[in-house]
Image: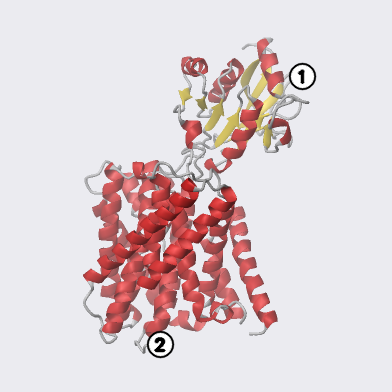
Amino acid sequence: MSEDEILLGLALTVALAVGSQILANRLRIPALILLLPAGFTAGALTDVVDPERLVGPDFSALVSLSVALILYDAGLGLDLRHLKGATRTAVLRLLVLGVLLTWGTVMALGPALLGVPAAVASMIGVILVVSGPTVVGPLLEHVGPSEKVRRVLMWEGSLIDPVGGILGAVMFHSIVTGGLQTGHFRVGAFFAGLAVGLLGGAVGAALLWLTLRGLRLGETLGTLAQLATVVVVAAGCDMAYDDTGLIAAVVTGLTVANLPGFDMPARRPFFETLVQLIIGLLFVSISATVTPRSVVPVLLPVLALVAVLVLLTRPLAALLSTLRTDLPDPERAFIGWMAPRGIVAASTATTFAGPLVAAGLAGADRILPVTFLVIVATVLVYGLTARPVAAGLGVARPSRSRPLLVGGEPWVVDLARSLRDAGAEVLMWAGDAGQRGRIEEAGIELAAGELMAAVTDPQARLEGVTAVYLLTGDDDFNALASIVMEDSVDGPVHRVGPPPGGQGVVAPYTGGGTLFGPRLPRHALAARHERGERFWARPAPAPPQPGYDALFVVRRDGRLEPVTEAGPVAAERGDTLVLLGPALAGA
């Protein structure tokens, strides 16, 4: 390729990776639904979006190291305190039964459906056992199921990826050394691979202990240290045994997240952005290597295989794995309807398909297109049906708003009562013991005392909270908390405005969403409440009378929309207005 073609190929790959994710965010759909077709189309229509031409034979090595970074980031989100009881039982069973049933299904149906020998069917079966946090995570964010379901699926997705990678490596070597036939499974090699990965994880954790704990590196250098450590450890493990770097990456992240004493940066914006970019680049690049000519012959057989995997194999694995646990039947059913394939399946297929084709294994050229089609089909099936299925089973997050009001001053508690009267499911938090007592006396649900400490963890999530309103009497606290909590809430974070011309350290100089506009900063709200004005919930669409200010609109379906500095919110018939003003006639 010429220099201009290389530049065009790189630019187009990055543009597709980022553009697809932005568009998916706007459409509120999983990014994979757009990334895979975008890469496939670009690969079919152009010659420049071709990683094998852009990068050469080193592409599979780059894929392996990139996936290691993704899995390290996933490991950082795994809290061992949550791996207990039904969660632990279900995850361990899924890792065993899910692998055996999926592998067995493809082994049994592959030769007849796909027209491939048993060795290729076995290789495809191993590849398809994986799921992955890169595709499961966004789907769960979209659906918002219960915390138990989220934990089971995230733990399964994060742990099955490296296990599947090692299984793929063992199967590959078994086929090659068996004369391109299905040889016996090398149990010793599998456990040796696990040992290499665990040792690499221990080395990675030790290196990060030295850099993050011993040297006290800040956010920038700490992020660089994490990147370097994961790459070095994963590369070393992969040199010792294929795909063991994935185990090392997950173990390193898991250790860093759970071992007391690590001085992890509170925020890793560069690292998180890098992982997001890597995901997009990998999906576009790998899907670009799949040609329409290779897909057409296996399209219908793969759809039949996917139907069996989705409708029979996965539900059976979930049913057996959650048997005799305290998971309710609807949650067990939803776990049985969530097994999309992701980046590790694509990377494993990319890594092993080429060498098997070069070795002359009949049917090996179908490994990559079959894997690609299974990824596309499962992402489409689960991506488009997960929310309706969850709603039908009653495990989806309700559309009704559940705001968290932070603060316990009298006017804040009065506002919370009005929001509750308007139909919102209000949750409150306050640090002062007296304020917490005032909240409890008002009969409003009080959040746990350690809530604000928990959300400083970049991987923490405020489950069930749809918005946060920071209404304390400390403007600097409100400003800082609005920044820290932004990534921990599946919804907006707003703060009450500081007094104009205030001399706070932070509040006057930070942006972010400010409630109620410039006419109603915090001190004005408190003063009007002290003078006897109150918050009132009244039906819309009648406009507020003079002397009354609209603060919130509660939609007929329970959604809550605040008035902000951006301007008022239009109320429609059937909505409810929350007003601030004197006693209403007839109240």
Q: Indicate the amino acid at tag 2.
A: Ala
Up/down of 458 relative to 63, above or below: above
Quadrant, the N terminus: bottom right
Residue 46, percent across and down? 62, 80
Q: Which residue is drawn at the image coordinates 57% and 78% (left, top)? A: 50
Residue 574 visible here: no
In the rendered image, which residue does mark 2 sit on?
A: 358
Which callout, 1 or 2, points to the residue nearer the camera? 2
Question: Residue 183, percent across and down?
Answer: 23, 80
Left-right relation of 269 to 115: right
Label 1 sits on a secondary structure element that is loop
Residue at horizontal 66%, vertical 22%?
579
In the picture of the structure, the residue carrying the numbered disc 1 is 546
Q: Secondary structure at mark 2?
A: helix
Furthest residue in direction bottom, as rendered:
360
Task: Return the x and y of residue 418 as percentages of the image width and height.
Answer: 57, 21
Indicate whether 260 appears above or below 311. Answer: above
N-terminal-most mark, 1 or 2: 2
The answer to whether any part of residue 8 appears in the image is yes
Residue at x-position 51% and y-position 39%:
399
Residue in the foreground of this view, choosing between 565 and 75 = 75
The CA span between labels 1 and 2 is 80 Å
Q: Is residue 227 above or below residue 242?
A: above
Residue, x 33% and y 82% (percent of image)? 116
Examine the image and state in which quarter residue 536 appears.
top right
Check residue 105 in the rendering and tell me which mark sits there, or answer none: none
